[in-house]
């Protein structure tokens, strides 16, 4: 599959989503144990929302991935078009460090913010882009460019989850884990408490039982590539030092948890077909043809 972009401007259709359990309202003042005080006890309504699609060209696993052709359109364009359907976003931008990506995005009408090549992950790229936006926002949604089939209802769901949980600085989504993905390190698993707050994320299977096998009766959860942050926390995030669990698992969510901040997780019904490596392109195109997703 050729990675050359084919830029166009037609819109993709929305896929219906069922959120099977989700937003539990929190009434606590935003103070996390061991975390830095950043909200100052305010119970402000976080209403102004910006979506940011971080796009990095020099990926170690898939060079030029945002521009890969998916059934006639570059993947970054498909992500943009799907994200535009979310009702909670007041603004949507692409944040990139590559002029080829920027040129393609401007070609299909996207707003683009150029960011530094030194950003270590999508969260840091979102943080830099936030500083460069003219308007102020309360919530930033990080929409990963390789999850171009993420339903707009999921974007809205993570925004509403953060709005309803003033003691959280971060929200994300998870879906049911397929047994065949149990030991795939590219499929990140998560566990939550009984109020829907994240306990841990791992590339390994969690929880892990004594038998060492997948328990077909256990509702394992797969983390999805969508997350939203309180904007004040996002400004703090790049200054937090890397943490041991984050470095060991190579998962940026763990730096949030290790520093004592709270993260809300909603459970959604979503059939996952992200693009991690070049071989995934043919699989996702086959899936889209079967589902009649053009």
Image (tube, rainbow, N blue to C red):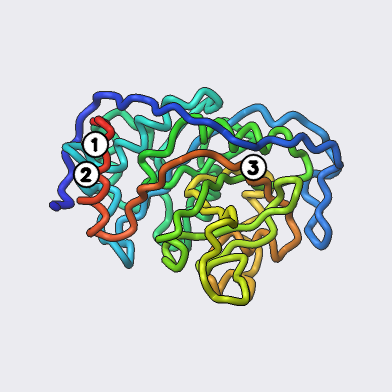
Would residue 16 be found to the left or right of residue 216 on screen?
left
Rendering coords of residue 122 (x, y %): 47, 54
Which of label 1 and label 3 is nearer to you? 1
Tell me the residue that label 3 is attached to. Answer: 231
Tell me the residue that label 2 is attached to. Answer: 286
Is 203 drawn above or below residue 93 in the view shown? below
Question: Mark 2 or 3 closer to N-term?
Answer: 3
Q: Which sits in the foreground, 161 or 42?
A: 161
Rendering coords of residue 92 (x, y %): 45, 32
Is 171 drawn above or below residue 80 in the view shown? below
What residue is shown at x 61% (from left), y 71% (from top)? 209
Rendering coords of residue 200 (x, y %): 65, 62
Would residue 210 be found to the left or right of residue 128 on screen?
right
What residue is shown at x 55% (from left), y 63% (from top)? 215
- Tag 1 and tag 2, C-beta contact below 8 Å: yes
Q: CA distance from mark 1 to mark 3?
A: 39 Å
Tell me the residue that label 1 is attached to. Answer: 290
Question: Mark 1 or 3 closer to N-term?
Answer: 3
Label 3 neighbour load within 10 Å: few <14, some 14-19, many 20+: many
Res 134 seen here: no
């Amino acid at each position: 599959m050729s990675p050359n972009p084919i830029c166009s401007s037609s819109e993709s259709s929305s896929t219906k989503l069922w959120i099977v359990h989700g937003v539990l309202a929190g009434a606590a003042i935003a103070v996390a144990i061991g975390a830095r005080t950043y909200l100052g006890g305010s119970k402000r309504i976080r209403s102004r929302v910006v979506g940011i699609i971080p796009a990095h060209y020099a990926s170690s696993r898939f060079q030029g991935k945002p521009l890969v052709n998916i059934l006639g359109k570059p993947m970054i364009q498909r992500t943009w078009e799907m994200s535009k359907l979310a009702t909670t976003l007041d603004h949507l931008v692409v944040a990139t460090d590559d002029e080829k990506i920027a040129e393609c995005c401007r070609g299909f009408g996207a707003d683009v913010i150029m960011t530094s090549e030194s950003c270590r992950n999508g969260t840091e790229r979102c943080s830099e882009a936030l500083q460069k936006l003219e308007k102020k926002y309360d919530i930033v949604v990080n929409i990963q460019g390789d999850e171009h089939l993420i339903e707009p209802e999921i974007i809205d769901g993570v925004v509403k989850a953060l709005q309803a949980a003033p003691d959280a600085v971060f929200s994300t989504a998870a879906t049911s884990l397929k047994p065949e993905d149990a030991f795939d390190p590219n499929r990140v698993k998560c566990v939550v408490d009984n109020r829907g707050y994240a306990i841990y994320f791992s590339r390994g299977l969690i929880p892990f039982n004594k038998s060492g096998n997948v328990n077909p009766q256990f509702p394992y959860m797969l983390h999805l590539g969508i997350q939203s942050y309180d904007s004040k926390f996002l400004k703090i995030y790049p200054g937090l030092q890397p943490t041991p669990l984050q470095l060991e698992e190579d998962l940026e969510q763990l730096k949030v948890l290790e520093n004592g901040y709270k993260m809300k997780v909603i459970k959604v019904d979503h059939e996952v077909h992200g693009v991690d490596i070049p071989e995934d392109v043919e699989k996702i195109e086959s899936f889209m043809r079967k589902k009649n997703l053009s």
